[in-house]
Amino acid sequence: MNKQKTYNIPYVGLKKEVHTFDYQLDGEFFKKDENSLIQDGDVDVKVIFDKSNTPYILDFEISGSVQTDCDRCTTVIDIPIKGNYRVYVKFDQNADELEDEDLEILFLHPDSSVIDIETYLYDFPLLSIPYSKVCEDVNRTCNPEYVKYIKNDEEETKNENENIPDPRWAGLNKLKDLK
């Protein structure tokens, strides 16, 4: 197994068999995008490159943890992540013009000699983060100062909603008043 520092797979010189590449992603990698949900992380990515058939297949096995904000109190929490993703590599003369709308298919020009997987190394850990991220998911309690404000807002909203009559019932209330 190779420990990779660059995010290119030079497939031209490789034999037609299965190859494995290991990547260690840390906070510096995720900070390349200043708007990233991931503030820091320790993510292991195993890329299994199957060159034995066409289209080539890239299997990504993601495991580790990332630091991101709690959805409730905005405290930074460590979220464990795990995921498996597959990308098919196809060759096309017009690869530069084809849209990259599908994450599962990567089009390369037949003259290219490397597969750039940096985008996948960034996107797949992001896709592995749970939709809801709260402190309780990682056996922590939310910041009590923030929770206090959240509960006050919820109570005020509830009280405001209780005092406003629902206009859908106005017709029924008229019938009730006829008694």
Image (tube, rainbow, N blue to C red):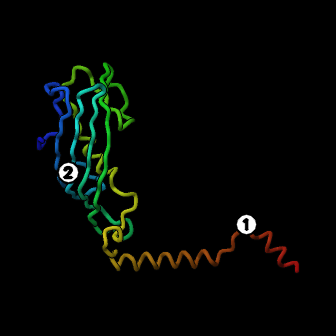
* CA separation in Å, label 1 and label 2: 55 Å
Q: What x and y, as percent, mark residue 66?
A: 25, 58
Examine the rendered structure and indicate whether residue 141 appears above or below residue 43: below
Q: Nearer the viewer, residue 68 or 139?
A: 139
Residue found 39% across the figure and 69% down from its top:
72
The residue drawn where x is 34% and y is 33% is 105
Q: Which residue sits at x=18%, y=34%?
A: 9
Could you tell me which secondary element the residue under label 2 belongs to?
A: strand
Q: Give residue 61's position: percent from left, percent from top.
A: 26, 46
- Residue 111 falls in image quadrant: top left
Q: Residue at x 16, y 26 (%)?
A: 15
Q: Earlier in the sequence, mark 1 or mark 2?
A: 2
Which residue does the numbered mark 2 point to in the structure image?
44
Three-letter residue code for mark 1: Arg
- In this figure, which residue is indicated by the disc labeled 1? 168
Q: Looking at the picture, tell me which residue is in the foreground, 149 or 66.
A: 66
Label disc, if present, on residue 27 of the rendered structure: none
Q: Residues within 10 Å of mark 1 (few under 14, many from 20)?
A: few
Q: Is residue 77 left or right of residue 2?
A: right
**Where, quadrant-wise, is the C terminus in this rendering?**
bottom right
For the N terminus, the image quarter is top left
The percent position of residue 50, horizontal first and vertical second, equals 24, 32
Q: Secondary structure at mark 1?
A: helix
